[in-house]
Image (tube, rainbow, N blue to C red):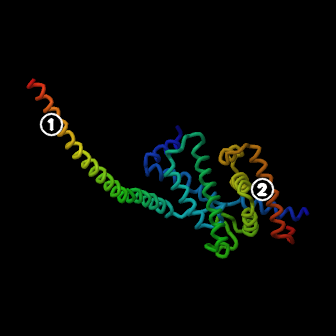
Amino acid sequence: MENSNNWIDEAFKSVQDQKQPMLNADLFSKIEQRINKEATKVVLMPIWKVAVAAAVILVINLVAFKDVSYTDQNSATTEYQLGTNYNFYANK
Amino acid sequence: MNIETELIKQISQGDKIAFKELYSLFSNKVYATALHYLQNIPDAEEVTQDVFLSIFNNASSFKGNSSVNTWVYRITVNTSLSFLKSRKRRTFLFIDDYKKEIPDFEHPGIIEENKENAKLMYQAIDTLPDAQKTAFILGFIEEKPRKEIADIMEISLKAVESLLQRAKANLRMKLESLNPNRRN
């Protein structure tokens, strides 16, 4: 049993007595590439979103323009009626 | 503010020189820890990349509640454990077959006369539950102070001690079962 514990104790020690493993020298440039790739993704993604947003803004503007034209016609009628009324009172 | 915290602040503003400086301070530690978990050089390199990418992207979320060292180790432990889980899933689904490619892990830092014992040790460590594995790697192999392990794992000192004792007991049992006839 004591002998059995011996090799197990040695096995435990074996993972403590170790040198620092060497790190691949290219690793930092790989990380930089991944950072740049992610940054490019961020720039590329909005392009189609901008196109969709532009289309939505165009539609909203067209609808708004249509509404304004309609309101202008109504305003002209009201102004005419007011003018008529004014003339009516002025003539009195 | 110490130099590491200052570097993190600069990284959060996109400073790549500060990032390189932090990399030179921590890359060997991150890689060494990842290698204990993954027992495979390409996977440990991938995890090291993931850890530093995470540091770069999340530097602004570092609040200074713990030291930078603790924060970096916490990211390393979590990334390594997540990687292990996904590797097990891939192996289970037959997408990956890493065990066949690397039957016995030989840690590159182990001295020649310890290689046989270390190989068995790493096989046994691989079978430990996540928390025991972390306590053993940080506490026994890397010989970190218990307080630091408690901070990294966000548990009490007592819990660290208990995990470490259970890990050692389980490893002894596992080693005996891996090599029942060996006596010295």
- From the viewer's side, name the closer residue of B76 and B33: B76
Q: Position of residue B101 (x, y in %)?
A: 64, 75
Q: Label 2 neighbourhood size at 10 Å, few (<14), some (14-19), many (20+)?
A: many
Which residue is pictured at 66% across the width and 44% down the height? B151
Can residue B32 be spotted in the picture? no
Q: Position of residue A47 (x, y in %)?
A: 35, 58
- What residue sits right under mark 1 in the picture? A80
Q: Position of residue A82 (x, y in %)?
A: 17, 32
- What residue sits right under mark 2 in the picture? B167
Indicate the quadrant containing the N terminus of chain A: top left, top right, bottom left or bottom right. bottom right
User: In the figure, residue B99 lies in which quadrant?
Assistant: bottom right
Which residue is pictured at 64% across the width and 72% down the height? B93
- From the viewer's side, name the closer residue of B84 and B149: B84
Q: Label 1 neighbourhood size at 10 Å, few (<14), some (14-19), many (20+)?
A: few
- Disc number lying in front (2 or 1): 1
For this view, does A20 lie left or right of residue B117?
Answer: left
Q: For the residue labelled by badge 1, is the local secondary structure a helix, a strand or a loop?
A: helix
Can residue B86 be spotted in the picture? yes
Q: Amino acid at mark 2?
A: Ala
Q: Amino acid at mark 1?
A: Tyr
Which chain is mark 1 on?
A: A
Q: Are marks 2 and 1 in contact (CB under 8 Å)?
A: no
